[in-house]
Image (cartoon, rainbow, N blue to C red):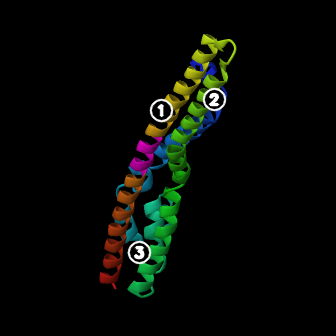
Amino acid sequence: MLDMVTAAGWPIWPMIVASVIALAIILERLFSLRANVVAPAGVLEQAIACGRAGEGLDALEGSPLGRVLGAGIRNRNGSPEDMKQAVEETGRAVAHDLSRYLTTLGSIASMSPYLGLFGTVVGMIEIFAAQSPTSGADPALLAHGISVALYNTAFGLIVAIPSMVFYRHFRAQIDAYLVDMEQQAIHLVDAINKGR
């Protein structure tokens, strides 16, 4: 691996930094976007019980779904529109929190091929710089320029492809969570309004 980094030359270092950042984001999001963390089972039933009893609201706040449902419960004495508005506002904040770092991951996914292309251009420049009108081409310099070009192209794709796959996976996962939260919030509002 170290030989590959050495052969690729200095243009590979920004891609290595980008790959470390992408890997850290992927691992953090895999941990943070687990279903039992975002929308644990039984939270809706617990929220309905809290809304009817008027207590136990603090126990809900441990998950994003609990935050959304808790906002509705806090506004249970208002009109159904007030409850829905509170749920929507908290839902937007939760959606923002769930999407944390995804812009950076998407940027790395779209930027990495360009970094690879930059390394390719640097390698091609080294190839042409190895040409001399008097002595011809130095095979060692030509080989180095080709290796810089190819390694950077390959590494750019190696960073970009998994980054884009995980970016799209997390986007779809967050969208599914938000739809589920919206449905559960509607059930909560209906259950509390029927109990009045």
**For the residues bearing labels 1 and 3, Cβ distance under 8 angstroms:** no
Which residue in the protein does label 1 denote? 158
Which image quadrant for residue 183? bottom left
Which image quadrant for residue 12? top right
Q: Residues within 10 Å of mark 1 (few under 14, many from 20)?
A: some
193 vs 15, left or right, is left
Sequence-wise, the earlier of marks 2 and 3 is: 3
What secondary structure is marked by label 3?
helix
For the point 56% across and 39% down, the residue is 24
Quarter holding the C terminus is: bottom left
Q: Residues within 10 Å of mark 3 (few under 14, many from 20)?
A: many
Q: Main secondary structure of the magenta part?
A: helix
Sequence-wise, the earlier of marks 1 and 2 is: 2
Region in magenta: 163-170
Label ID, residue 51: 3
Task: State the residue lying farthest toward the front.
Answer: 134
Q: Position of residue 123 (x, y in %)?
A: 60, 27
Q: Residues within 10 Å of mark 2 (few under 14, many from 20)?
A: some
Q: Between residues 106 and 34, which one lies in front from this camera angle?
A: 106
25 vs 77, left or right, is right
Q: Position of residue 68 (x, y in %)?
A: 45, 68
Kind of residue indicated by mark 1? Ile
Kind of residue indicated by mark 3? Gly
Kind of residue indicated by mark 2? Ile
Quote the CA–CA distance across marks 1 and 3: 50 Å
Which residue in the protein does label 2 denote? 125
Q: Position of residue 29 (x, y in %)?
A: 49, 46
Q: Between residues 32 and 129, which one lies in front from this camera angle?
A: 129
